[in-house]
């Protein structure tokens, strides 16, 4: 059974087709880097897997069942999170606010739920952040709390939409290493979207690259090639490898360094 299966999936917005007849199978227990140019559909794909976005055609199955809203087997960190820094909550309350599906408002937690919050905080190494206000935390520390939220209920599939945004290289490395450890320790399937490949290279099993409504899934060596990326970008692309880094170039421009914007 695949973690995620798309069969002939097409999704569009306002006369613009974001995904066009995409079919793919993502195996269980893999760390998948989801990449692609701005507007390629990375967020759309995750919302489709979550059952938040209806498809125009095709079918989506998650862990053998049709995609649906509120699937407890799927954890999710969305892309828009700037408000978190301004909430008047400590770390514990922020994580607890998502317990049992409550995103905002603090539920009354029984002993089992309190243990679950404690487990999630410990799993991401955020026990020391439990009593600190969000406003005093760094971006990397807040990212640990968001990951703890996503782990409540112990999901089998974890969707992380651009978790490296606004983090410096040190904190980016820390987040990738943390997610990779959790993925290995618990056998979770991870879809980790980013606008640059290099921070993920040490962790990913496969790349899912999106572009022009199409998708390519495979190992780095299979997908990050001139023919595949030229097809997905719709223009000539060169792939330059230097030591342990890969640069995706259009002429003299590194396309993955372009200013990031949302695809929805």
Image: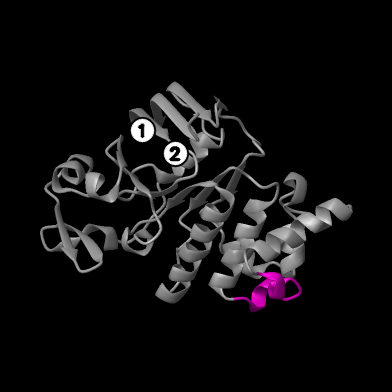
Which of the pair 237/12 is nearer the observer? 237
* The magenta stretch spans residue 177: no
Which quadrant holds the C terminus?
top left
The location of residue 242, given as percent across then percent down, is 18, 67
**Direction bottom: furthest residue:** 136
Residue 103 locus on image (x, y percent): 71, 51
Q: Which mark is residue 45?
A: 2
Q: Taking 254 as reference, is 38 left or right?
A: right
Q: Marks 2 and 1: in contact by CB < 8 Å?
A: yes
Structural crowding at the residue carrying mark 1, measured as other residues with C-alpha within 10 Å and reported as few (<14), some (14–19) or many (≥20):
many
Q: Magenta stretch? A: 126-137
Q: Is residue 56 above or below residue 188?
A: above
Residue at 23% across / 49% down in the picture? Answer: 221
Q: Quadrant of residue 14?
A: top left
Q: Nearer the viewer, residue 236 or 130?
A: 130
Residue 79: x percent and y percent?
Answer: 51, 54
Report whether 122 appears left or right of 210.
right
Whether residue 98 is visible here, answered yes or no, is yes
**Sequence-wise, which precedes: disc 1 or disc 2?**
1
Q: Is residue 225 above or below residue 18?
A: below
């Amino acid at each position: 059974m695949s973690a995620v299966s798309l069969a002939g999936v097409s999704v569009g917005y306002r006369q613009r087709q974001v995904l066009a007849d995409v079919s793919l199978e993502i195996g269980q227990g893999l760390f998948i880097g989801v990449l692609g140019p701005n507007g390629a559909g990375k967020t759309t794909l995750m919302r489709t897997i979550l059952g938040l976005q209806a498809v125009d055609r095709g079918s989506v199955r998650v862990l053998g069942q049709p995609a649906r809203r509120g699937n407890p087997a799927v954890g999710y960190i969305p892309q828009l999170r700037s408000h978190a820094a301004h909430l008047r909550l400590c770390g514990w309350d922020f994580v607890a606010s998502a317990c049992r599906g409550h995103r905002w408002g603090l539920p009354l937690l029984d002993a089992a739920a309190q243990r679950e919050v404690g487990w999630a905080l410990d799993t991401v190494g955020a026990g020391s952040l439990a009593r600190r206000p969000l406003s005093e935390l760094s971006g990397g520390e807040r990212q640990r709390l968001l990951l703890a939220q996503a782990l409540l209920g112990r999901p089998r599939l974890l969707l992380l939409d651009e978790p490296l945004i606004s983090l410096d290289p040190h904190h980016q490395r820390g987040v990738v290493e943390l997610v990779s450890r959790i993925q290995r320790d618990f056998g979770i399937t991870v879809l980790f979207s980013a606008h640059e490949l290099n921070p993920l290279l040490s962790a990913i099993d496969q790349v899912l690259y999106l572009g022009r409504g199409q998708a390519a899934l495979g190992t780095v060596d299979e997908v990050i090639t001139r023919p595949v990326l030229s097809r997905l970008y719709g223009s000539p692309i060169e792939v330059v490898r230097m030591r342990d880094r890969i640069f995706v170039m259009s002429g003299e421009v590194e396309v993955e360094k372009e200013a990031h914007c949302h695809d929805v």
